[in-house]
Image (cartoon, grey):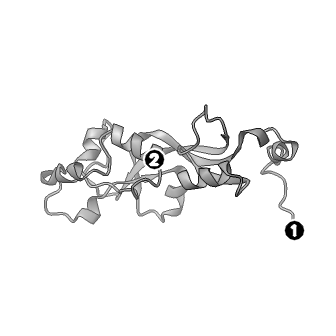
């Protein structure tokens, strides 16, 4: 993310299609983001996961099981949000798994992942949504230099409607 922001900042590229929530800060003097889509992020697991069916889930319950990790530094705001709820990638958390909660089952059977309405649709039914959302949203945004955010050609993009028929180019 940082490198892509640098490329826009230095005018090497005109825009960058970024993933939420990793956008430039709202008060960034050079860059701004035009949000194109936004959706909730929730936890997903196999249908036979021990947490399935629980309606009172808390982040502490999730922390007792292995969760998918992120490449360090790839999505800094996502990493920060996960760390704030006790799901960071730090080695200490890995040592605090509650193995007694899942004795006799393989770690791969019990790993908890992250999903969105779109990703859940394409996973083929192997994963089921747990009733707990993460404290950030997923989606896409166009990151541009602040001075071009009001350019007529860029503003014209917002006038395109999905309901219009696709035209071959």
> What residue did someone put label 1 on?
169
Q: Are marks 1 and 2 in contact (CB under 8 Å)?
A: no
> What residue did someone put label 2 on?
76
Measuring 60% from the left and 55% from the top, which residue is drawn there?
Answer: 4
Q: Nearer the viewer, mark 1 or mark 2?
A: 2
Distance between mark 1 and mark 2 Cα atoms: 37 Å
Position above or below: 158 against 65? above
Measuring 34% from the left and 57% from the top, which residue is drawn there?
Answer: 47
> Which SS class for mark 2?
helix
Left-right relation of 122 to 94:
right
Left-right relation of 64 to 71:
left
> Residue 1: in sight, yes or no?
no
Residue 162 percent coordinates (x, y)? 77, 51
> Residue 110: in sight, yes or no?
yes
Position above or below: 34 against 169? above
Disc on the earlier residue, 1 or 2:
2
Q: Within the image, what quadrant is residue 71 found in?
A: bottom left
Left-right relation of 36 to 57:
right
> Which SS class for mark 1?
loop
Residue 78 percent coordinates (x, y)? 45, 46
Q: Residue furthest front?
A: 10
Q: Residues within 10 Å of mark 2 (few under 14, many from 20)?
A: some
Mark linked to residue 149 = none
Measuring 67% from the left and 39% from the top, which residue is drawn there?
Answer: 30
Residue 164 percent coordinates (x, y)? 84, 53
Q: Residue furthest top?
A: 27
Badge count:
2
């Amino acid at each position: 993310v940082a490198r892509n922001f640098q490329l826009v900042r230095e005018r090497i590229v005109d825009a960058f299609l970024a993933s939420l929530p990793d956008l430039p800060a709202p008060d960034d003097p050079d860059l701004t983001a035009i949000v194109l889509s936004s959706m909730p992020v929730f936890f997903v697991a196999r249908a036979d996961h021990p947490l399935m069916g629980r309606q009172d889930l808390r982040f502490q319950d999730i922390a007792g099981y292995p969760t998918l990790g992120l490449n360090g530094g790839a999505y800094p705001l996502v990493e920060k949000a996960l760390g704030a709820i006790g799901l960071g990638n730090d080695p200490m958390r890995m040592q605090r798994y509650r193995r007694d909660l899942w004795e006799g089952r393989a770690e791969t059977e019990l790993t908890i992942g992250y999903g969105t309405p779109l990703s859940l649709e394409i996973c083929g039914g192997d994963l089921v949504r747990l009733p707990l959302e993460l404290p950030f949203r997923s989606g896409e945004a166009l990151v541009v230099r602040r001075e071009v955010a009001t350019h007529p050609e860029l503003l014209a993009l917002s006038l395109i409607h999905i309901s219009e028929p696709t035209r071959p180019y």
